[in-house]
Amino acid sequence: MYDALTISAIVDELSTQLEGARIQRLAHSDPLTIVLELYTQRQRRWLTLSADHNNARVLLGKESGERDADHVSPLLLLLRKYARGGQIVAVSQPRYERIIQFSLAKVMGSGDSDDESDLGEDTSEPDITYSELIIEIMGRRSNVMLLDEDGRIREAVKRVPVTMSRVRPILPGKPYVPPPPQSKADPLRATADQLFTAAREGSGKLDRWLVGQFVAISPLLAREMLYRANIEPDTEPANLTLDDTAKLDTAVHGVFAPLESSRWQPHLYEFEDGGAEFSAIELQSLANDDAVNATATSSVLEAANQAWQLGPAAAPGRGDRHAVRRDRILSEIDIARDRVQQRLRSLEQQQERSEDGENLRETGDLIYAYMWMIEPGQAQLVTPEGAVVKLDPKLTASENAQEYFERYRKAQSAAEQIPQMVQNTRQQLAYLDQMRSMVSLSTGYDEIEAARMEWSEYAESTPGVTRASRNRGARPAANARKPHQYRTAHGDTILIGRTGQQNDVVTFDIASPDDLWLHAREQPGAHVIIRASTTEAAQETIESAAQLAAYYSNGRQSTTVPVDVTERRHVRKIKGGGPGMVTYRNEYTLQVRPQSEDELGLTPGS
């Protein structure tokens, strides 16, 4: 659990173990994770810094773990230049922030080459370069960055352009700007009376109110405080009594006391249904849970390593093992989607520029028409009509005209090619949106395994897509590629595609031209087919199938969802689109409430 309190404990331990450590090697273990081989206190250690969307982490271990020698990033190259051969001189944390800063120093000329061989004697004056290696553990916004001694960003594992964040772009050469300060209260300065007064104006569940009221209180810490104060988490803040706030104040200060004393009590918590969690303090709410095996550890870093090896927790409220697998796939899809989105923006900008091609040709004609007015070295031409033409003073008038004509020809060529590229990229983005929707709605093992296989096939066939979760040695589930099938009370069969590939199967391999086809209108979702037992499907069957189409779509949480119904003969694959991408016509629309097969009382078919 990398909340601000735990990170403070980690920084205490890292400061003791790593100050003065020599950085020997650096590598990626995956695109978002950097591993540093260190020599400290007469032994080798491996420091892992990961900005993974769902598993951002800091680990220090005696074993190197996985390393991807083939993956080289701009950040890795700059780390090898400015950090390899250098030392960690300090480890720090801005108070209450989920940020760790490693201050580095290196004598340039010793170890800054990528060549591992002996570089020979350097007789030049020592040139010490200082850098900051920063990891921010903030969910989807997690990042690893290298700064120069002036606080400017050298590189980051995840660049954030101005188009994604105007407030805090993360790009090489930009000044590093810390995350905006939180407008929350300091938990160590709170008193029982202040808690009582603030709670009078609070609303919602008490555990969520605590998270929103104070800095550094994570949902897990909020539940721990309420457990110690013997207050139910779903209590309304306004219902707290003075006695309640007094007990809560004691609990808050008790949880945060190690922040001042550095007397940490690291623990590992193994859950009965799989996975683990760790903390820098004893969490009484978990230690007293019969479904949790709590163990004190010698250090919080040891607890973090063990929790990582055991996998994320599968306890109530923490997600299950299926959710962990699903979230890993979603994080990889999100990375791919961001890249496609950036490529689409770039293509659209190129398309806009290509539409100005005619102006380039006219500019070239103007230069030829007024060539007699242009002197050698002239930077611009002003025609008698007042038109201003920019010139390259290094070129002759004729060469300037030819330069504009060449740009015109390139613009014409781009104007012919870019529209198709834009269309293809939009189709790819739509397919990723569909895949993301299907993955996010998957629950059981078979569904998630089917989603994993489809994502794997896409990632392996698409240049530039990195897939971290290889799942080596895993055998595909027997039912992973089978669409869901149900029988209604009228004897009709309903088929549901749960991935893009399954959508193709139910629509184009199983369904007949006169079968009914259903899909949530204008949003990603499942293809649903009705195979009637008689000439026409019962109206109740159509209603149930529509409710299933709504349930297995992005509109699952909506009160009602529009669902289109048409005959399968009117459904066509999109040329160049991914699995499950179709167009259709001759539809009519039903407004239905999303319901699952269990809620509808449907019987699984064979």
Image (cartoon, helix red, strand yellow):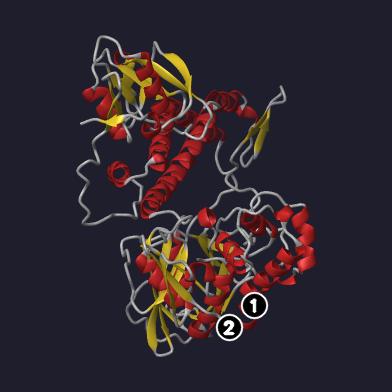
The quadrant in which the C terminus is found is top left
For the point 72% across and 54% down, the residue is: 239
Q: Report the disc number at residue 263.
A: 2
Q: Does label 1 or label 2 sit earlier along the sequence?
A: 1
| Nearer to us in this view, 513 or 89 | 513
**Direction from residue 475 to residue 458 in the image, left or right:** right
Is residue 20 visible in this depiction of the protein?
Answer: no
From the top left corner, tell me how far across and down residue 173 is, in percent: 58, 59
Is residue 515 visible in this depiction of the protein?
Answer: yes
- Count the marks: how many? 2
From the top left corner, tell me how far across and down residue 233 is, in percent: 60, 57
For the point 35% across and 24% down, the residue is: 582
Q: What amino acid does circle 1 point to?
A: Ala
In this view, 523 is above or below 20: above
For the point 51% across and 53% down, the residue is: 140
**Direction from residue 28 to residue 51 in the image, left or right:** right
In this view, 472 is above or below 186: above
Residue 209 placement: quadrant: bottom right
Q: What amino acid does circle 2 point to?
A: Arg
Q: Dot 1: what SS?
A: helix
Check whether the beta carbons of the residues at disc 1 and disc 2 lie within 8 A of each other: yes
From the top left corner, tell me how far across and down residue 433 is, in percent: 43, 36
| Nearer to us in this view, 203 or 73 | 203
Q: Dot 2: what SS?
A: loop
Residue 193 placement: quadrant: bottom right
Query: Which residue in the structure is indicated by mark 1?
Result: 257
